[in-house]
Amino acid sequence: MTLPILSRAHLFDRVRAVILALVVLGVPTATAKVVVNVTQGTINPLPIAITALQGEGGADPQVGAAISDVVTSDLRNSGAFRPLDPAAFIQAAQAAADQPRFADWKVLNAQALVTGIVAAEPDGRLRADFRLWDVFEQTQLAGVSYKFPAQSQSYRQIAHMIADVIYKQLTGEDGYFNTQVVYVAESGPFDRRIKRLAIMDQDGANNRILGDQPSSLVLTPRFSPNAPEITYMAFMGNKPRVYVRNIETGRQEPLGDFPGMSFAPRFAPDGNRVIFSQAQGADTNIFVMDTRTRSTQQLTSSGGISTAPSYSPDGSKIAFESDRGGQPQLYVMDAGGGGAHRISFGQGSYDAPVWSPRGDLIAFTKREGGQFYIGVMRPDGSGERIIAQGTHVEGPTWAPNGSVLMYFKQQWLGQTQSRTRLYSIRVTGQNEHEIPTPTDASDPAWSPSLTQ
Amino acid sequence: MNMNMKLVGVVAATILLAGCHSKSETTADTGAMSGGDVSSSQTGSAIPGSEADLAQNVGDRVFFDLNNSELSQEARQTLDRQAAWLKRYPSVRVTLEGHCDERGTREYNMALGARRANAARAYLVALGVESGRIQTVSYGAERPAVLGTGESVWSQNRRAVTVVAQAGA
């Protein structure tokens, strides 16, 4: 897989082209009777039959099958669906693509059915038509046509977009499959650990190390909400500094020239400002810089350590951690820096709050009694809930729909060997599963949706 | 003074080369400071004013409790020796590296390492070492001294290490 992953700007161009060519295939006005409720504590995964999209007009039949495989994998990994084994299908996929014989799917107890074709277009591109059916109501719930380049990995992007449509139609929530994750790829012994920026699709496909990295020790990459940019901390020489990198061009530069160490960066929701920390003597404080004007404002000065800031999605508040009262706890303050108040009051210490893109929850890492925990609480501190735990779990990041998180887990295998991997989990604490990476991986950051 | 320093350095280096080439494998040892007569130092000892000299004969690191940056009695004694050593070699500049064990989070460890480095630096400055000679940096938990997990490992990784940045002048 040496094909370059789509940068966000390129992807937007492609998505625009796709959307221009997008045809809605006879979508009914009736709403779906079949739904899966993903907000309750326990999800009953919805049984769904996903047929291989059938090749037509000289199109490679493997492309349609590959698209269906990715759709199947996305929906299964979400925890909200139970894709049925195609070996049990009664009606042939080709016949179903022409007209589903609903009785054949009802006996399998498939609640929903996916059919479709991939056809070769005169201009050399491919066209994927898919339809989603409510088996028991015998109605079409969705139908979309996409055109895309025949070469490259773009079929995967189309598959993720199809999975997004199905997920949205049947859960009511936005899908999160057409997204990327930037993370830190780790290698080498721990006293000389090499940590480099890597990027992949949310399912682990199209993994690659970002090129031309000036430092082999980077931490905490974070996506811009609206541009193909990331911000991260890198050790350059003897100094940790915040950088901003365009993942499309590879161009990167320090955020600014600050007197001390700068670290813990994160974009503001408008993408025009970066909030970060600077060490000043014994204290660490939070600053914000406008990347257009380069003006910097100090937001905390309460003594102790204040770090790991994260904006609310409306930009009006900032969650952060501080040990001003003793051990690290979570605080929320106004975006201008005033009105800081503590929101975490449980046992142990609370670190690195991350505001949900939906605004309703703040995820955090908690340490207590030799264990690490990933949890969520409401912005007022109520409703605290632990969703994952381990000897070392850290660094939650939200999928753009605010329903799924990713984090990293380090597991010790004996005294000096360990394994560190990324895990995805629903905000309910269900469906924890590993995201495959070629090496040890940490500090994941989920991109916004790449579908316009 | 500088001239003498250089000469002494050359003498010691010659002795070192004429002896064995065993470099300091146990740099973490906080041995007592060697006597003032450098030319009579043992074979295998380090060049005076060097990183190895600091590590072997003075003690280049101090240790901290979990989530803590307060200097223990033992840490102060080590820093007392470091201050005396730094006054003896006034052209030496150092970087104080603050480190944490693995049981913190990325961001907090970076800040805590900075606070530990600053605590050691402030103590040296209070003892009369020029502040301009001491830089600080935090490595968080990214550069452990001892590999593995468990308290015996963690206690050696929660540290501030004085590293010679630039010797002689």
Image: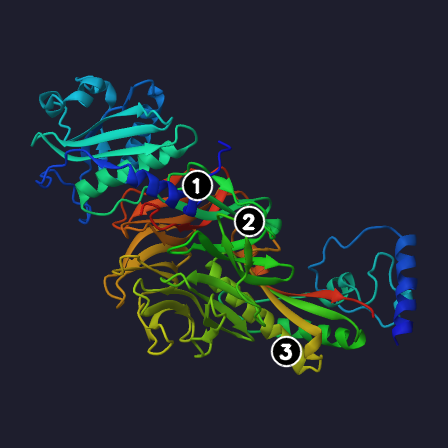
Q: Are marks 1 and 2 on the same chain?
A: yes
- x, y percent for residue A378: 26, 63
Q: Are marks 3 and 1 on the same chain?
A: no
**Can residue A57 be seen?**
yes
* Residue located at (62% from left, 73% from top): B120
**Can residue B68 be seen?**
no
Q: Are marks 3 and 2 on the same chain?
A: no
Say which element carries label 2.
Answer: strand
Residue A6: numbered disc: 1
Mark 2 burial class by Cα count in 10 Å: few <14, some 14-19, many 20+:
many
**In this figure, which residue is indicated by the disc labeled 3?**
B123
- Which amino acid type is marked by label 1? Leu
Closer to the camera: disc 1 or disc 2? 1
- Which amino acid type is marked by label 2? Lys
Nearest the viewer among A284 and A417 is A284
Residue lying furthest front in this view?
A: A122
Q: Are marks 1 and 2 in contact (CB under 8 Å)?
A: no
Mark 3 burial class by Cα count in 10 Å: few <14, some 14-19, many 20+:
some
* Residue located at (74% from left, 52% from top): B25
